[in-house]
C-alpha cells in the first residue's frame, strides 16, 4: 500500500499546508469524529438486534395462536 518514503512525505506536506499549531487540533477532531461514528454504528447494531428479536418473537407467537392445518386426502 504505502512504501517507506510516502508516509514521511505526506506528514511533511500536511505540516507545510496546515502548520505546526493546527495539526494537533485536526488530529483531535478526526479522532472525535471516528469515535462518534463507532458509537453510532454500535447503537445501530444494537437496535437492529433488538428489532430482529422482536420480529422473531412476534412470528413465534402468531404460529402458536393458530391451530395447525390438516391436509385433506
Image (tube, grey):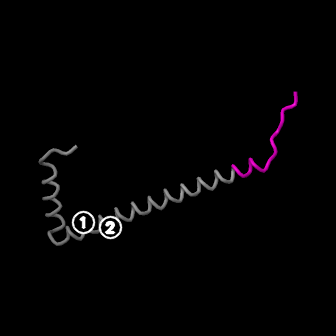
Residue toward you, 2 or 43 = 43
Q: Is residue 56 above or below residue 27?
A: above
Q: Which residue is mark 1?
A: 27
Q: Residue at x 59, y 56 (%)?
A: 51
Is 14 situated above or below 69? below
Residue 54's disc is: none
Image position, residue 60 (x, y; %): 69, 49
Q: Residue furthest top?
A: 73
Q: Which residue: 14% across, 69% down? A: 20
In this image, 15 relative to 30: left or right? left
Identify residue for label 2: 32
Residue 70 colored in magenta in the image: yes
Near-viewer residue (15 or 4): 4
Considering the numbered disc 2 on the image, is that residue within a helix, a strand or a loop?
helix
Residue 66 location, x and y as percent?
Answer: 80, 47
Picture residue at 72% right of the left edge, 52% below the top = 61
Tell me where residue 73 appears, x and y as whole percent.
Answer: 87, 27
**Relative to 17, is 66 above or below?**
above
Left-right relation of 50 to 25: right
The range drawn in magenta is 60-73
Amino acid at each position: 500500500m504505502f512504501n517507506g518514503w510516502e508516509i514521511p512525505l505526506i506528514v511533511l506536506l500536511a505540516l507545510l499546508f496546515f502548520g505546526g499549531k493546527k495539526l494537533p487540533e485536526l488530529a483531535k477532531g478526526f479522532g472525535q469524529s471516528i469515535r462518534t461514528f463507532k458509537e453510532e454504528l454500535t447503537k445501530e447494531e444494537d437496535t437492529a438486534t433488538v428489532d430482529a428479536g422482536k420480529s422473531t418473537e412476534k412470528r413465534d407467537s402468531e404460529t402458536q395462536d393458530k391451530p395447525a392445518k390438516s391436509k385433506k386426502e
